[in-house]
Image: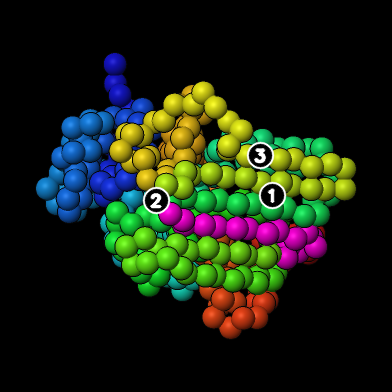
Amino acid sequence: MNDDRPVIGMIGAGMISRAHMPGLQRLAREVLIYSVEGAEDVAETYGGTVVATFEELLERSDIVDIVTPTFTHYDLVRRCLLAGKDVIVEKPIALTQEQATEVVRLAHDLGRRLFPAHVVRYSAPYALAKEAVDAGEIGEVAVMRFSRSGSFPTRTPWFADAEKSGGVLMDLTIHDVDVARWIAGDIVQVYATLRRAGTPEQPMESAHVLLTHVSGAITHCAGLWGPAHLPFETEFSISGTGGTLAHSSRAESAVVSTVAADDLDAGLMPVVDPQEDPYGLELADFVAGIRGRRETRVTAEDGLDAVRVVSAAWESVRSGQPVTLAPTMSTTARSAT
């Protein structure tokens, strides 16, 4: 039987690659792995073929999945797009708004698909909340609260350098910023605070972001990189004129991880049920979108707007003032109809 599944090349072999590999193996005829280090370990654990060079991966792949550190995303996305590849890239799509704008425009100009891996949209509690809101089950959304916390990722030094990671805002809180926009619509004002504490050996970083939506709804997002013993936890409440939706990961039980145990013990990754693996669901959506030329749950423009809002949050942190955002193209188009 002819196997018409794509060859998918994965660039990077860090922690997040281990979350992507089970899904990639189900979707691809062959998974190629290129990384400066660690590729052999990933291939030994999950399968796949290690390639010696970036150029070989580009030559042999139909789709490229970028799971490298944040500060490398912009350059790698550009190179893959220019090589004629459709690209999946871990969030954020790029480190700055300017870089994100450039790669989204480049993908459009080249006729390639670019997918930012905002995995929380595929997590069951958030997807169900979106469905309930869209169905009008709680009336008009008024106030939303999201929190996301885990241990500071000290095992990977670049996270502590905000110039490379974007800090807790760009790495962690961006998830809830994206979901808030997905559920309640575009954002017109951002106010944020950030605090760094602890020691160089055990730093801690917390952020609070207040979002005002075009609709008038208000969202509060709280993000924390805490001490080493802190487990990964998420919560939300979505209150509308007709009711409230709520979720707490602490209330969940009897779940099994799809990633290796040593990647979970520092509280860096959520524990998920393999039957509802959001990483596998997002990758399946992206690959189907490429092959069927259809819309996906997350678009390149969504990735750009998430970076745009978090960049405004950083601006607010520095100035101590709220930042007003101009309407996006999607907002302008809706208001004209």
Task: Give neighbour class at mark 3: few <14, some 14-19, many 20+ (Cα, 10 Å).
Answer: some
Q: What is the quadrant of the C terminus in the image?
A: bottom right
Separation (CA) of disc 1 from disc 2: 32 Å
Disc 2 residue type (three-letter): Ala
Query: Viewer-nearest of labels 2 and 3?
Result: 2
Q: Reply yes or no: does residue 216 show up in magenta.
A: yes
Can residue 70 be seen at all in this image of the molecule? no
- Residue that label 1 marks: 183
Q: Are marks 2 and 3 in contact (CB under 8 Å)?
A: no
Q: Are marks 1 and 2 in contact (CB under 8 Å)?
A: no
Q: Position of residue 248 (x, y in %)?
A: 63, 39
Residue appearing at x 29%, y 21% in the figure: 2
Task: Give neighbour class at mark 1: few <14, some 14-19, many 20+ (Cα, 10 Å).
Answer: many
Residue appearing at x 62%, y 45% in the figure: 235
**Disc nearer the start of the sequence (2/3):** 2
Residue furthest out toward the bottom = 319
Q: Secondary structure at mark 1?
A: helix
**Disc nearer the start of the sequence (1/3):** 1
Give, as a single range, the part of the protein colored magenta.
212-227
Disc 1 residue type (three-letter): Ile
Q: Which mark is residue 228?
A: 2
**Disc nearer the start of the sequence (1/2):** 1
Q: Nearer the viewer, residue 123 or 271?
A: 271
Q: Nearer the viewer, residue 110 or 34?
A: 34
Can residue 316 be seen at all in this image of the molecule? yes
- Residue that label 3 marks: 247
Is 179 left or right of 37, judged from the image as shown?
right
